[in-house]
Image (cartoon, grey):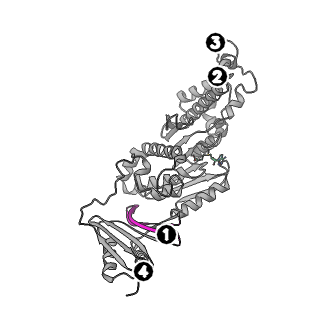
């Protein structure tokens, strides 16, 4: 037997522990020339199929691959055949095996006493249960940069981590009930589910959504598409998807939302897509016949241009105070920039909610994160499913729109679809 080579009986024991019942995790660490190479493998279930997730960390760079049982067995042979000094830790339900190979090639093995562990790894008690801890997410969080090399959430990323978690909670709430029905129906459960993240930026939400829908909500056939007009963020996001071995399921497209076309989507999301990009995301959701539109708007400038900025007087058509114009009635409010900005945000989101309601969506405007986390903490949660063009929603919309004498961008954008409903009441 050569130096560094393991005893055949030990090799057999490692194979039996990894490929047999109750396997939990194997980690082998090699330190050489001041650098560290680590490979970890653990069982996962993807689309109801048993797989092994291998995570390679080479001097801080993480690469994840989901392997079939045969590919995992091949990978294990490479772990066993590794030369040089190394450490190996293997956990199974029945106990641990620890092996250290010294620089001189001596192999030292220790085994824990027999145990009776439950294989499903539960999040640590002190870890707050949030969507991103409901599944083994350490590789995901490190790769997308929300966590550091040790797996701790970076202080500077805490806000984004909270936003993504809260967004995922809304996703669960939104698809929750229908999902339970689908899971009971095998045919529906196998249907493809396509999500588009409009203005995906650095893809924190985009990639997390894929893992959450697949591993927690158990959608077996999810595709998530992140769209952004910035080439640098798209290139970085594509690299992260490849590192996590999901590049065929999490796609990134460099495009302006206004020109990006798709035939159909099941869910359209946007998280702080700037200005009218939020309207564009909603319009695409309508045109792609998405059942769900979840949109957390960002800064909004379009109505501000119309209201007060240029000291223009807008004649108000429904002015009960009788002073002649909305701007006169609201002069005290519109004079203050912050208040005018907030008023315009509220009006814009009200118009958006009302337009989607006219077009057949049930709409709820909710606060998805605390106001301390971000002032942009409103989310429009929309699910298709009511009769479009009903007099009530149309009337409410026209009253508010005509009171302010503005034309919201979303109305202009969706004029072909909306026109027929609005015209009936004009
Ligand atoms: C504030 S960032 C938010 C990114 C990401 N959703 C997040 O929450 O981390 C807004 C993103 O929307 C993108 N964006 C804005 N308008 C767009 C448009 N018309 N088409 C495509 N992307 C757009 C920007 O490039 C930017 O990356």
Secondary element at tag 2: helix
User: Of label 4 and label 3, which has the lower sequence position?
Assistant: 4
Q: Is residue 422 visible?
A: yes
User: Quarter holding the C terminus?
Assistant: top right
Q: Find out whether the residues at labels 4 and 3 contact each other: C-beta distance under 8 Å.
A: no
Secondary element at tag 3: loop
Secondary element at tag 4: loop
**The residue at label 3 has a CB less than 8 Å from ligand 1:** no
Question: Badge 1, how many Cα within 10 Å: few under 14, some, many 20+?
Answer: some
Q: Name the residue at 54% across, 36% down.
A: 377
Left or right: where does residue 209 sit relative to residue 129?
Answer: right
User: Of label 4 and label 2, which has the lower sequence position?
Assistant: 4
- The part of the image, by quadrant, that contains residue 112 is bottom left
Report the front residue among 345 and 109: 109
Residue 146 at what x, y percent from top left? 52, 52
Q: Name the residue at 31% across, 74% down.
A: 16
* Residue designated by label 4: 104
User: Looking at the picture, does residue 151 appear above or below residue 426?
Assistant: below
* Residue designated by label 2: 403
Left or right: where does residue 406 sit relative to residue 41?
Answer: right
User: Quarter holding the N terminus?
Assistant: bottom left
User: Of label 3 and label 1, which has the lower sequence position?
Assistant: 1
Q: Name the residue at 51% across, 62% down.
A: 244
Left or right: where does residue 107 sit relative to residue 377?
Answer: left
User: Of label 2 and label 1, which has the lower sequence position?
Assistant: 1
* Residue designated by label 3: 321
Report the front residue among 397 and 128: 128
Say which of marks 4 and 3 sits in front.
4
Q: Which residues are magenta?
A: 31-59
* Residue designated by label 1: 37
């Amino acid at each position: 037997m050569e130096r560094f080579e393991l005893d055949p009986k030990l090799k057999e024991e490692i194979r039996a522990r990894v490929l047999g019942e109750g396997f939990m995790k194997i980690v082998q660490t090699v330190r050489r020339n001041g650098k560290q190479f680590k490979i970890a493998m653990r069982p996962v279930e993807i689309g109801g199929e048993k797989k092994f997730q291998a995570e390679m960390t080479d001097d801080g760079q993480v690469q994840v691959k989901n392997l079939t049982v045969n590919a995992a067995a091949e990978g294990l042979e490479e772990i066993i055949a590794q030369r040089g000094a190394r450490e190996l830790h293997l956990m199974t339900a029945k106990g641990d095996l620890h092996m250290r190979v010294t620089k001189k090639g001596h192999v030292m093995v220790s085994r824990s006493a027999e145990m009776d562990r439950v294989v499903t790894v539960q999040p640590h008690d002190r870890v707050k249960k949030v969507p991103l801890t409901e599944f083994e997410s350490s590789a995901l969080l490190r790769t997308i940069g929300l966590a550091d090399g040790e797996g701790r959430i970076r202080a500077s990323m805490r806000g984004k981590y909270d936003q993504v978690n809260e967004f995922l909670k809304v996703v669960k709430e939104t698809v929750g009930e229908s999902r339970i029905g689908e899971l009971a129906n095998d045919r529906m459960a196998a249907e493809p589910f396509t999500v588009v993240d409009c203005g995906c930026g650095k893809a924190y939400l985009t990639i997390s959504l894929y893992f959450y829908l697949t591993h927690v909500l158990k959608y077996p056939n999810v595709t998530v598409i992140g769209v952004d007009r910035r080439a640098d963020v798209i290139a970085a996001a594509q690299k992260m998807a490849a590192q996590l071995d999901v590049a065929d399921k999490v796609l990134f497209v460099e495009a302006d939302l206004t020109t990006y076309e798709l035939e159909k989507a099941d869910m359209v999301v946007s998280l702080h897509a700037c200005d009218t990009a939020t309207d564009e995301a909603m319009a695409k959701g309508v045109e792609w016949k998405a059942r769900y539109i979840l949109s957390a708007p960002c800064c909004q400038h379009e109505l501000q241009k119309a209201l007060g900025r240029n000291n223009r007087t807008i004649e108000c058509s429904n002015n009960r105070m009788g002073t002649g114009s909305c701007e006169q009635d609201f002069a005290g409010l519109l004079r203050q920039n912050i208040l005018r900005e907030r008023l315009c945000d509220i009006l814009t989101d009200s118009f958006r909610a009302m337009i989607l309601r006219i077009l057949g969506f049930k709409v709820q405007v909710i606060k998805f994160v605390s106001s301390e986390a971000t002032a942009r903490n409103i989310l429009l949660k929309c699910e298709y499913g009511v009769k479009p063009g009903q007099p009530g929603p149309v009337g409410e919309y026209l009253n508010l729109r005509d009171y302010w004498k503005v034309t919201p961008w979303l109305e202009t954008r969706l004029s072909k679809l909306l026109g027929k409903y609005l015209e009936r009441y004009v």
